[in-house]
Amino acid sequence: MSDKNRKIYIQELKDPVVFIALGLGSGLSPKAPGTAGTLLTVPLVYFLQQQSLLVYCLVTLFVLLTGSWVCGYAARKLNVHDHSAIVYDEVAGFLITMFMMPANWSLMVLGFVLFRFFDAVKPWPISWCDKNIGGGFGIMFDDVIAGLISLFCLALLQHWFFPL
C-alpha cells in the first residue's frame, strides 16, 4: 500500500463503509484530519453522557467491534494502510477517553486535548503498536491505547481539579 495522504476520489466516497471510516467526510479535512474526526465525535460523546452507562458502553462496544473491519475495509479500498482520512479509530479513541466522565465541557476540552496529544505524538507504547500491529486491528489499536492513556490522565486530573 502507498501514500497515507493520497487523494481520495468521489467514487470511493460512494462506498458507505469508506464514508463511515472517513468520519462522514470529516477525515477529508486538508489540515489535521484526525482532529476533525475527533471533533465530529464531541456531540456524540456529549449525547451519550446524557444517557445511561449501559447505552454509552453499548455504543462504544459497537464502535470497537466494528472498527477493525471498517478501518481494514477502507484501507484496502483506498489501497493505503491507515490513510490519514480514516478517522473511525479516532471515534473509538475519544469514546474511550471520555468513558464514565461527567458531562462537563471543561473535561470534554481537556479530554480532547489529551487524546489528540497522545494520538499525534504517539509515545511508547502507542508508537510500538502503530508500527508493529497491522491491518484494521492495528489501525484501531493505537487509538484505543491512546484513549486508555488519555482516560487515565483525565481521571487523575478530574480527581484533582474537578471533584464531584
Image (cartoon, helix red, strand yellow):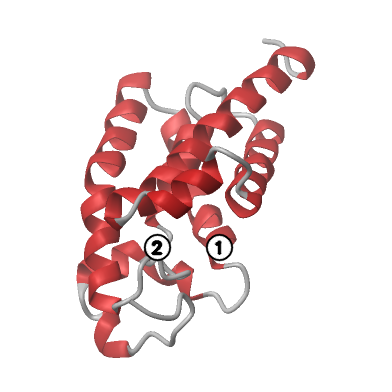
Q: Residue at (63%, 43%) from the top-left corner? A: 123
- Quadrant in the rendering for residue 29: bottom right
User: Which of pointers 2 and 1 lies earlier in the amino acid sequence?
Assistant: 2
Image coords of residue 134 (percent x, y): 32, 55
Indicate the secondary structure of the residue bearing disc 2: helix
Q: Which mark is residue 113?
A: none
Amino acid at the residue labelled 2: Gly
Relative depth, front residue between 31 and 103: 31
Image coords of residue 46 (percent x, y): 51, 38
Q: Is residue 123 left or right of residue 27?
A: right
Q: Is residue 12 left or right of residue 142?
A: left
Residue 36 seen anywhere in this rendered image of the structure? yes
Indicate the secondary structure of the residue bearing disc 1: helix
The residue under label 2 is: 23
- Vertical order, 23 against 14 (above or below): above
The residue under label 1 is: 36
